[in-house]
Image (cartoon, helix red, strand yellow):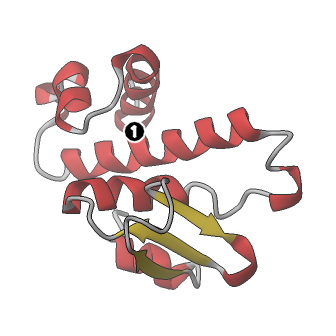
Amino acid sequence: MFKTDKEFLKENNIGLCLFEEQLWKRDGFYIPGIRTIFIKNNLTDDDKHKVLLHELGHIHHDPIKYQRLLLQYENQADRFMVKRLIEEELTQYEPSDFNWLQFANRHKISTSWGQEMIQEEFKNIVGI
């Protein structure tokens, strides 16, 4: 079942705070100790949504292992974001209308790392 961002946050007891752009160079981050996601306030709504989905992808990661598993954890968070964006898209369009390249361009996802991930997640969602 499709869940909204607010439902995900509430279900996982995660807070959300916006911060001024000059405080950090990053667009967003998650602090597990206080179960809060922080997002730069000057991002577009679409970019805030993408950052939120990416950071939600980190909520089950072990912060003690983060530095050692950085690439794996970041890949998992990106995969979570891509999966959710595809699920959202499929609430509006038929699977037969899905085009991975248009999806990547619309969501500003790099095709160098995104192509395979987008295609895999689409196939997993629609059961191909």
Q: Determine whether, in the image, residue 102 is placed left or right of residue 12.
A: left
- Mark 1: few, some, or many residues within 10 Å (few <14, many ≥20)? some
Residue 18 in the image, given as x and y percentages of width and height? 40, 77
Q: Nearer the viewer, residue 43 or 112?
A: 43
Q: Residue at x 21, y 63 (%)?
A: 45
Q: Nearer the viewer, residue 122 or 30?
A: 30
- Is 104 placed above or below 39 here? above
- Is 66 placed above or below 71 here? below
Q: Nearer the viewer, residue 66 or 89?
A: 66
Q: Nearer the viewer, residue 75 or 17?
A: 17
Residue 73 in the image, given as x and y percentages of width and height? 69, 43
Residue most extreme to the front: 22
Residue 105 in the image, given as x and y percentages of width and height? 20, 28
Q: Determine whether, in the image, residue 54 is placed left or right of residue 48.
A: right
Q: Determine whether, in the image, residue 119 is placed left or right of residue 77.
A: left
Q: Quadrant of residue 125?
A: top left
Report which residue position mark 1 lands on. 125
Q: Residue at x 51, y 62 (%)?
A: 24
* Image mark count: 1
The quadrant of the picture occupied by the N terminus is bottom left
Q: Residue at x 26, y 28 (%)?
A: 104
Residue 94 in the image, given as x and y percentages of width and height? 13, 38
Please name the amino acid that badge 1 sits on: Ile
Quick one: SS at disc 1? helix
Q: Residue at x 70, y 33 (%)?
A: 71
The quadrant of the picture occupied by the C terminus is top left
Q: Determine whether, in the image, residue 110 is placed left or right of residue 28.
A: left
